[in-house]
Amino acid sequence: MNRERQVGFLFFGVLSTLFVFTVLIGDWDLTGKYYKIHAEFAEGGGIEKGHPVLYAGVGVGKVNEVRFENGNVVTLLHIERVYDIPDNAHFEIRNATILGGKEVSITRAPGIAAGPALPKDGTARVTEGATQDIMTQFNELASEFKHGAQSFNQILEDVRAGRGPLGSILYSEEMTENVQRIVRQARDFLEGLNHGEGTVAALVHDPALRDQVRGAIGKIHEVAEAADR
C-alpha cells in the first residue's frame, strides 16, 4: 500500500471519528427531527442524559444535556417536531418506573386552555412550577370571590326580608349600577369556574383581568360594609 493511500485512510478515519463524537454523542441534530427546550428545575432528582420526555403520558423526546446554572438544574430537552408543547405546560421530574429511572413529565392543568406552542426554530426556556404559581394565585382569587359572593347573597336576603339600613343601596343610582355590574361579573366568573373555560382560562394568563376581578371583590366588600352601617 503506497503512502498516499495510507494517508487517505488515516484522514477518513479521523473524519469518521469526529462525526461520531459531534453528531451521535454530541448535541448535533442533522436530521432536523428535534427542536430544543431548556427546562429549569430547583432539584435534579437524578435526571440524566438519555432519560425520556413525556407529554400527557406520550413519549415525545429525550433529555440531551443536564447542567448546573445559577444554583438550579437546567436540562436541554430534544422534542420531536411533530409535537407542539404549549407555553403554559407544567414540567416536572418524576420516577419513570417503580424500579427506578427518571423522566421529564410535561402536563397541562385540567380545564385550562392550551397556550401558544413553544417555538421550534429557536430555544425556549421554561421554569418548573411557573404554572403552579399562577394556579395558586387563581385558587386564592377564586376563594376570595366566592367569599365575597356569599356576603353579597346575604345582603340580598336581608333586602328581601326588609332587614338592615339599606336605603342608600336601594335608592342610590350609582350604588345600584355598581351592584348590577358586580352581579354580571360574579355570574360570568362563577360560570367559567364551573366549566373550566372562558373567563377562568383567561384569568390564569391575564394579570390585568385578575386585577379587574380583585376590584370587583373589593366592591362587594364595600357593599357589605355599607349594609352593616
Image (spheres, rainbow, N blue to C red):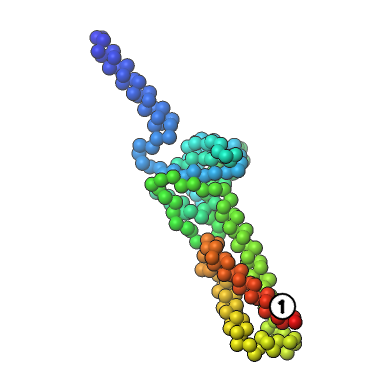
Residue at horizontal 46%, vertical 47%? Answer: 124
Residue 228 or residue 101, whichever sits in front: 228
What is the x, y in percent for residue 187? 58, 76
What is the x, y in percent for residue 110? 55, 59
Residue at horizontal 55%, vertical 63%? Answer: 207
Say above or below: 148 vs 155. Answer: above
Q: Which residue is mark 1?
A: 225
Residue 13 or residue 100, whichever sits in front: 13
Residue 181 or residue 82, whichever sits in front: 181
Residue at horizontal 53%, vertical 36%? Answer: 66
- Let me know if residue 109 appears in the view: yes
- Let me know if residue 149 appears in the view: no
Quarter in which the N terminus is drawn: top left
What is the x, y in percent for residue 145? 64, 70
Q: Secondary structure at mark 1?
A: helix
Residue lying at the far top of the rendered structure: 2
